[in-house]
Structure formats: C-alpha cells, structure tokens
Image: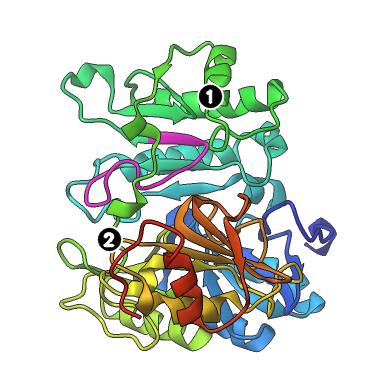
Amino acid sequence: MSAAFSAPVVKGWCPGLFAPMQAADGWLVRVRPPLGRITAAQAHLLANVAEQDGNGQISLTNRGNVQLRGFAPEAARAFPQRMVEAGLGQADPDAERRLALQVTPLAGADPTCAGETMLCAEALRAGLIGSPALSALPDKFGFCVDGGGFFPVGSLQADIMLQAVQNLAPERGDWRVVCGEARSEPQGLSEAVQTALALAGAFIKCLETMRPLRVPAVGQRLFAESGVAWAHAARTERQHCRALVQRAGPLTGHLYAVAAPLGRLTAATLRACADVAQTGDGILRMTPWGSLIFGGLRKMPEISGLIMYQNDPRLRVYACIGASGCGQASADTGQLALQLAPLLPEGMEMHVSGCAKGCAHPGRATVTLVAWAEGYGVIRNGRAGNQPLCVVPECDGAKVVRQVLSEGDVKNAAL
C-alpha cells in the first residue's frame, strides 16, 4: 500500500484516501463513505483513529466526506490500509479516486424519495469502479444521484447529476442526466448510468479544463461529443437549492439530523454519534451540508456540541479551518464566524474565509469576509475571490458586523 501513497501537494487539489495533504497542523486524511453512509462501528473506528493518530479534530466536508487532522507522516501512510480493511475505501487507489459520488442522504429510508435511488447509485458506483480510463478526470470532478423527496431534487450538486423525474409517461424513463446547462431526455436507470459515464469520458476526450459545475456551457459540448440527445436544463434542474434543505432537527418518519458547527466536531462527539446510531438502525448518513442523519430513533437525540434545531444561527455561517490548520490563512476564521452568528439578521448568510480561495463556501454568500493583512475584505453577495467593497480593520465581531451592515441592504440588526 505504501507504494501507492501520493506525493504531497499543498494546493490546487482535494485530498483523498491515498493522497493526504500536509497542513499547518499536520497531515490531513480523508475518507469517502461508500454511498454516503457509515456504520456505528466504522464511526467508532474513525473516532479512535482521530484520537490515537491525529489531533482529535474531524471535519465533515461539502461533499459528504470525513476529514481527520493532525496526523504524523507515518500515521498518514498507514491510514489507507486501515480504512480499506474497515470497508471505507477501495484497495485500488485509482478506483478509490474515481468515486467522487454523492447520493440523496435519505435514499432507502424516505418513502417520497425515488424508489430506485440506491439501485441507481450502486450501478453508477460499479460503473465508476469498472472504468479505469476515468482516472484521468480532475480530482474535484464529481457525480451525484439525486432521488428527491424530503430533500428536493437540486439539493445535491455535481458536475454530472442523475436526477429523478416526476414521470407522467413511465415508458420514457425515471432519470435525467444533467451536466452543466444541458440535460438528457428521461431515461431508464441503466441508460442514465451509461450516459453519465459517457459524458465523463467525453470530458477526457475533449481535453476540457473547466468542469461543468463551474462552466455550465461545457455540458453542451460533452453531450454533443457523446452523441446523446440533449435539451437546455431548466434553472430548477441545475440550480442548487441549498436554502431549502433542513440541516438539523426532526426530518420525516423516524429520521433526525444534527449539524456540526462549521462542519467541525471532535472524536468524542463522533463517538457519541455512533452510540446514538446504535440505538437506531446503526447507520450514520452523511450530507454535503455538514450534518449527520440518524434513522430508527424514537425522538430527537441530544448530543453535546452539535446543532439540534434548524433556526440555530450557526447554520448560516461558514468558515475554513483558518490559520491554525492552513498555512495560506491569516486569521482564526472559525472563532470570528461563530462570534458573528448570533448577530446576523434572519435570512442572512456569512462566509469568513482565511484567503481568497474560499474553500469552505465556494458559492455566493450575502456577506463574505476575507482575511487580509490589513484586516477583513468585505464582499456583498459574492464569493471570496471577488473584489472587496472595503477593508475593515481586524477587531471585535460587533464592530465588523456594524461595518458590514453600513455597506448596504441588511436592516434592523440588533447591535
């Protein structure tokens, strides 16, 4: 296994099971839970490894992955084999790398989710494992199988998306494949999976450098290269509806969600989550919005350090690991974000970024603060890489919010 260990690169890519990343607080390792699920036993293992080999800090990523921080090089080298043995990774590093696949978190448990969602996800996963040529895809190129239901279609976002359709004519198929601003006509499960794989292959063949998720026009070129009939995707088919997602609290049936503030939790907290899962169906369902979902419980669990209710203002702030874990960050972004959360007016989202990359929240936010040498750059309704309206000196959170509110459209903040 050690021969397959990738050489460390600090920026421009995503870490993976066989490609850890060196950070300011040690080596960072990542697991992609198969189909977005881990068992209680696997969660216990991850918690133990995080404490024994790392610094005990764990992150839930916006792709539903799990990151452990603070590893020594030797521990990072041993990590992949332990995860493969635990059923949390593929023994083939190339096959593992291809499995950037998200699945509707409630698939199989939500009766309003498309019934074939898990079958579709398993078929696509098998297709990715069996397609060595797709190892040439960029590290961040991803897929999703979106069955809708309680979490509506559009809750997941990826370069190639298989989305369930409300089918008035069953013979036309139950899935559409959306890639950038283009989509297929409704297809059957097997055909949709083959279309997704063909589009990925076309991306490689066309030598594309921009992913469809970032440059939607790429999707049209990939459909044309694949020879698959396509139409323009409606905005509702390709626009992320994260604002509609319930990230914490009772969901549907006996399903409950808890959210980690800023997507971060400790090994002890993950262990507590595993204990709770054991009282239900034994599964932790991962989401791309920093929460964990339990099934088979009789009531909402209470776990110290996690968010239990959807109206918690901490759900409306985002921050990267900051200077403590990243050499490119120049501030303790998490502390400021949590300080600001109770001060934010209802409906307002804030992103606090340690640099212009904006790793924690690539999309737009109502207000984005980007750490600069002179203080924080203020961006309205934009991304971390946009030009700031102004720069506020580094100071206490209330003063930062006061400066931000003076810049525009947010009113009636209690300061």
Residue 380 x/y as whole percent: 48, 54
Confirm whether residue 152 shows in the render: yes
Q: Is residue 168 above or below residue 128?
A: above
- Which secondary structure type mostly characterizes the magenta part of the structure? loop
Residue 222 x/y as whole percent: 57, 20
Could you classify mark 2 by the number of other residues whose Cα lies within 10 Å: few (under 14), some (14-19), or many (20 or more)?
A: some
Q: Is residue 3 above or below residue 277?
A: above
Marks 1 and 2: in contact by CB < 8 Å? no
Q: Is residue 375 above or below residue 232?
A: below
Q: Residue furthest front?
A: 406
Could you classify mark 1 by the number of other residues whose Cα lies within 10 Å: few (under 14), some (14-19), or many (20 or more)?
A: many
Q: What label sits on residue 34 in the rendered view? A: none
Q: Is residue 327 above or below residue 301?
A: above
Confirm whether residue 41 shows in the render: no
Residue behind mark 1: 219
Asked which secondary structure carries label 1, the reply is: helix
Residue drawn at 73 percent across, 80 percent down? 25
Residue drawn at 24 percent across, 42 percent down? 115
The answer to which of 111 and 377 lies nearer the viewer is 377
Which amino acid type corresponds to the residue marked 1 in the rendered image? Gly
> Which segment did they paint magenta?
148-162
Q: Taking 64 as reference, is 29 left or right?
A: right
Asked which secondary structure carries label 2, the reply is: loop
Residue behind mark 2: 246
Q: Indicate which disc, 2 or 1, sits on the residue closer to the N terminus.
A: 1
Which amino acid type corresponds to the residue marked 2 in the rendered image? Gln
